[in-house]
Image: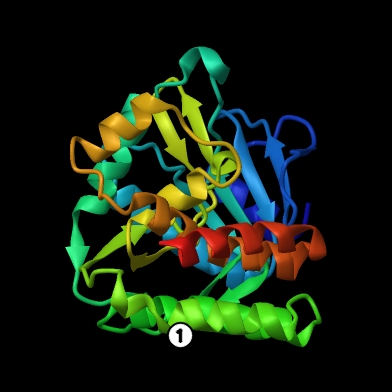
Amino acid sequence: MDTELRDCLMSLDLLPRGAPRPLGGGDIAAVSWLDTDQGPVVIKHDDPERLAGEAEGLRVLRQASSRLVVPDVLGEGDGWLVMEALESTGRAGRDETALGEGLRELHGASRALHGWHRDNACGTTPQPNAPLEDGRVFQRERRLLPLTRACHDRGLVDDRLRARLEAVAADLETWLPSMPASLVHGDLWSGNVLFTRRGPAIIDPAIYRHYPEVDLAMLTLFGAPGAPFFAAYWDGHEPSDWPRREALFQLYPLLNHLLLFGSAYRSGVERALSRVEAG
C-alpha cells in the first residue's frame, strides 16, 4: 500500500485490519477488499483518467438514484480509488422487480443532448462522448463507426463485415426514432449489478446520456434478467421494436469485446448485426 493511499485512509479514520485481499471478476483493473475498524472498503487501482471518470460516474449515479444503491466514493488519488464496500446477499436477496423500478427511475430524467461533458472509458477502450442533439448520429459517430474502424484496423473485422456495419449505422434514421437522452450506466452487464441488503446496487459505471436501451441491451448480453425485471421496467410501455433495438445496442459492447479480447466475439457481432438487418 503506497504512502498516499495510506494517508488517505488515515484521514478518513479508516484503520486497516490486515492486508488488502484481491477480488476476482475484473478483467481490467486490480480490485481489493480491505477490512478496517470502520468496516470494509474496496480499493481499485487503474489508469488515473479512467478512475477519475468512474469516480464521477459513481457520484452522478448516486445523486440521481433514490432506488438503486451506488457505492460512495471515499477517496481518490493518483491511480487508486477508495469506495464503500457492498456485500452481495446472493440469490436469496435477488429482487429483480426493485432493479427494474430503480433503473426505470434512473432513465426517467432526460436531457436534450446525447453524450457527456467529458470522454471516459468502457474497459480500457476510450469512449468519446462529445454531445450531439440527435441520438442516432451519436450512436453512429461516437459508438459504431469508431469501433468498427478500430476492429478493422486490427484485422478483427474484414471488409465485408465492415461494410455491413457501416450500412446499419447509416440507416438508423429510417427506423430508430429520435428521442431525448437518458442518463445511462453505460456498462451494465450482470457482473456490475449486485443485490444487497439495502436493495439492488450498480457499480463500475461508464456514464453518458443516450437511449435507455443501452443499459437494457447490456443487461441481456451475458445472461438476461427475468420477467419480473422487465415487467417493472417497461411498466406496460415496451416498444414494439425492442428486439431490434436490443440487437443494435448490443453491437457496441460486442465490438468493444472483439477489440479487447479477440476474434471469439466476432460471431456475436455477426449475430447481432443480422438481427438488426432483419428488422
* Amino acid type at mark 1: Glu
Name the residue at 33% across, 56% down: 212
Q: Nearer the viewer, residue 76 or 197?
A: 197
By what rule are the colours in the image chosen? rainbow
Q: Nearer the viewer, residue 271 or 67?
A: 271
Can you tell which quarter of the image residue 56 is in?
A: bottom left
Query: Whole-percent x and y of residue 102?
Result: 30, 38
Q: Residues within 10 Å of mark 1 (few under 14, many from 20)?
A: some
118 left or right of 211 in image: right
Residue 219 seen from this side: yes
Q: Nearer the viewer, residue 203 or 174?
A: 174
Can you tell which quarter of the image residue 209 is in?
A: bottom left
Q: Nearer the viewer, residue 176 or 229?
A: 176
Name the residue at 56% across, 59% down: 272
The C terminus lies in quadrant = bottom left
Name the residue at 61% across, 28% down: 37
Query: Whole-percent x and y of residue 173?
Result: 30, 79
110 left or right of 67 in image: left
Q: Residue furthest top?
A: 92
Q: Which residue is mark 1?
A: 141
33 left or right of 82 in image: right
Query: Whole-percent x and y of residue 145?
Result: 54, 83
Name the residue at 75% across, 81% down: 158
- Above or below for 20 versus 271: above
263 left or right of 160 in image: right
Residue 123 seen from this side: no
- The image shows a total of numbered marks equal to 1
SS at badge 1: helix
- Above or below for 6 versus 226: below
